[in-house]
Image: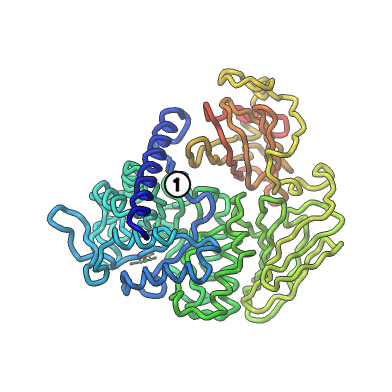
């Protein structure tokens, strides 16, 4: 790239970094209800996509490998398909820090140094990722960042690093969460937006604190290139759907597509990871990948399911005898349905529109995302023959859907809530009332903590936006069959999208209706749903909730 253009871009990048840093400070100053140390970098609003060397090369990483791969990501169409990050894993360093305590790139592997690699990758319009450890040494024995967080974060920012994978070997006795928070804060203090990937292997239930700390979190130990490893990781990760949302994703580890599983199994992994809104990090030697492997990595329809802006992880709506059905609501009201046959011989798998959260409709169009064919049927039962270890993946659209009220609550759930006209709740706060002291009428009803309890917690924040989790617990003695939760925002939040509930807003009043799969709450159990929204002046959290017209304690 011409030097002048490069300088201009460097200046623009610096200006952007300064603006982002200022905005982050402003958000922190304005928001009293925010968790004090939330990750507020505004990154990963859809699951990160890219490549990482570890699965195919282990410690054999080098400058030429990284740069050739980056180049190939452009020429092969991967960049155009959405792959952005070129990630360097363990073993990039020399075995000791320099006299100033700085990490040093191994001069044999990276003769031009990391800044030059970052410049090269940026010159292609891609982003650079690097690897370090929340411990005294990396898993392969190179210097770790524990106790050096600020110095290392500053070094990464000075090189132009855009993504940090932070691993968990050699952590000693300091609590895991604390070690990860130290690097989160050090990265934030650099002022450079750096995606923070927690490679914590799912110990300490990282999904319960991941969204406050990073943009993605490994949920399991390492994947390997065989079907049973992939299957067991899928089983662990699929159960964690409630914790994923824009800005923070469950990470079932890097893809093994192209590394030795059968073509059918590779296709299953790519489909399941996309259905689970997982980061899509290619883990093979792309330069030598077969046309069949590249066709999997480049399936734009499947990638669109992963990258859908609604940002909901697909859920298992049924799983019997190794025959699984997963459903993932999409932002335009479609639902991505995966029929997965875990077993060693072909099988027929069926599901229904209702189970998948689709509205009652006169017909359904099933787009087969691998066969690239489409069928329209008036039946609301969908059936396919699925090969051993394989999937059939549909994007299903409801045609001529009946009104949401005539069908199960799931029918409207997948649509962006901001555009729907919600029926005004009897308790609606008069429109225009923004005062935090304006108490919504749910508070007028007697609270009944022996019936329900609701907690609201902000998950992540960025300038003008937020995601929050709402948990509803049945604290009574009878089952709640279908729930409608009403609350009011005391700030000026506007719901933009939601997951695991159908959410609408009228003025300050928010109404959330259960989905088919979480509508029944038995005593002692709870369920959660998520909201993404925007705000301008205040994002103070609601405190007064009613479920089915009874105030919760
Ligand atoms: C751990 C991580 C892997 C990889 C290696 C590198 O095992 O989980 O993904 O980064 O360390 O040593």
| Number of residue marks | 1
Queried on whether the Cβ of the residue with tag 1 lies below 8 angstroms from ligand 1, the answer reads no
Please give the residue where the numbered disc 1 appears in the rendered image: 209
Q: Residues within 10 Å of mark 1 (few under 14, many from 20)?
A: some
Q: Secondary structure at mark 1?
A: loop
The answer to whether one can see residue 339 in this image is: no
Q: Which residue is at 63% across, 77% downward?
A: 343
Identify whether 461 is placed above or below 222: above
- Viewer-side residue, 355 vs 553: 355
Q: Position of residue 439 (x, y in %)?
A: 62, 20
Q: Which residue is at 61% across, 54% downward?
A: 308
The answer to whether one can see residue 307 in this image is: yes
Q: Which residue is at 23% across, 67% downward?
A: 106
**Splitting the image into 4 quarters, where does residue 419 fall?**
top right
Q: Position of residue 148 (x, y in %)?
A: 23, 50
| In this picture, residue 492 sits left or right of residue 24 | right
Which quadrant does ligand 1 occupy? bottom left
**Splitting the image into 4 quarters, where does residue 104 fall?**
bottom left
Q: Position of residue 363 (x, y in %)?
A: 85, 59
| In this picture, residue 177 sits left or right of residue 531 | left
- Viewer-side residue, 181 vs 449: 181
Q: In the rendered image, which quarter contains the N terminus?
A: bottom left
**Splitting the image into 4 quarters, where does residue 352 fall?**
bottom right
- Viewer-side residue, 502 vs 293: 293
| In this picture, residue 83 sits left or right of residue 120 | right
Q: Position of residue 427 (x, y in %)?
A: 71, 24
Q: Indicate how the structure is coloured in the image.
A: rainbow
Q: In the rendered image, which quarter contains the C terminus?
A: top right
């Amino acid at each position: 790239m011409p030097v002048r253009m490069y300088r201009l871009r460097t200046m623009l990048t610096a200006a952007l970094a300064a603006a982002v840093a200022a905005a982050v400070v402003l958000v922190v100053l304005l928001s009293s209800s925010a968790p004090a140390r939330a990750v507020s970098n505004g990154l990963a609003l859809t699951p990160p996509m890219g490549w990482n060397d570890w699965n195919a090369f282990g410690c054999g990483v080098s400058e030429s490998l990284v740069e050739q791969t980056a180049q190939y990501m452009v020429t092969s169409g991967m960049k155009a398909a959405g792959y952005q990050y070129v990630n360097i894993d363990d073993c990039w360093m020399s075995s000791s820090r320099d006299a100033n305590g700085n990490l040093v790139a191994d001069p044999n592997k990276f003769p031009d140094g990391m800044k030059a690699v970052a410049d090269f990758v940026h010159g292609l319009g891609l982003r650079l990722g690097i690897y370090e450890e929340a411990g005294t040494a990396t898993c392969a024995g190179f210097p770790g960042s524990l106790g050096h967080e600020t110095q290392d974060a500053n070094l990464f920012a000075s090189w132009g690093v855009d993504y940090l994978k932070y691993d968990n070997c050699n952590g000693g006795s300091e609590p895991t969460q604390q070690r990860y928070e130290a690097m989160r804060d050090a990265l934030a203090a650099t002022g450079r937006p750096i995606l923070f990937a927690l490679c914590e292997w799912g110990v300490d239930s990282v999904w319960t604190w991941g969204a406050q700390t990073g943009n993605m979190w490994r949920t399991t130990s390492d994947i390997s290139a065989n079907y049973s490893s992939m299957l067991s990781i899928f089983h662990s990760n699929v159960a964690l759907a409630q914790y994923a949302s824009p800005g923070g994703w469950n990470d079932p580890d890097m893809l093994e597509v192209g590394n030795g599983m059968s073509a059918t199994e590779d296709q299953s992994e790519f489909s399941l990871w996309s259905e689970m809104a997982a980061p899509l990090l290619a883990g093979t030697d792309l330069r030598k990948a077969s046309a069949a492997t590249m066709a999997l990595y480049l399936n734009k329809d499947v990638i669109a399911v992963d990258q859908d802006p609604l940002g909901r992880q697909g859920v298992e709506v049924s799983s019997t005898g190794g025959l699984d059905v997963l459903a993932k609501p999409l932002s335009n009201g479609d639902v991505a349905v995966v029929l997965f046959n875990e077993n060693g011989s072909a099988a027929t798998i069926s599901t229904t529109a209702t189970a998948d959260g689709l509205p009652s409709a006169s017909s359904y169009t099933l787009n087969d995302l691998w066969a690239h064919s489409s069928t329209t049927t008036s039946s609301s039962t969908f059936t396919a023959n699925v090969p051993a270890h394989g999937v059939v993946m549909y994007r299903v659209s409801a045609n001529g859907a009946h009104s949401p009220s005539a069908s199960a609550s799931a029918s409207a759930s997948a649509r962006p809530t901001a555009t729907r006209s919600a029926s005004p709740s009897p308790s609606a706060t008069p429109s225009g009332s923004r005062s935090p002291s304006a108490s919504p009428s749910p508070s007028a009803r007697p609270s009944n903590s022996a019936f329900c309890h609701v907690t609201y917690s902000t998950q992540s924040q960025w300038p003008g936006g937020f995601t929050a989790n709402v948990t509803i617990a049945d604290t009574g003695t009878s089952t709640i069959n279908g729930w409608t939760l009403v609350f009011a925002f005391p700030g000026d939040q506007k719901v933009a999208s939601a997951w695991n509930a159908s959410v609408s807003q009228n003025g300050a009043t928010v109404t959330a209706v259960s989905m088919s799969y979480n509508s029944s709450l038995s005593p002692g159990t709870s369920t959660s749903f998520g909201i993404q929204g925007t705000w301008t002046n205040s994002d103070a959290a609601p405190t007064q909730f009613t479920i089915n017209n009874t105030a919760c304690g």
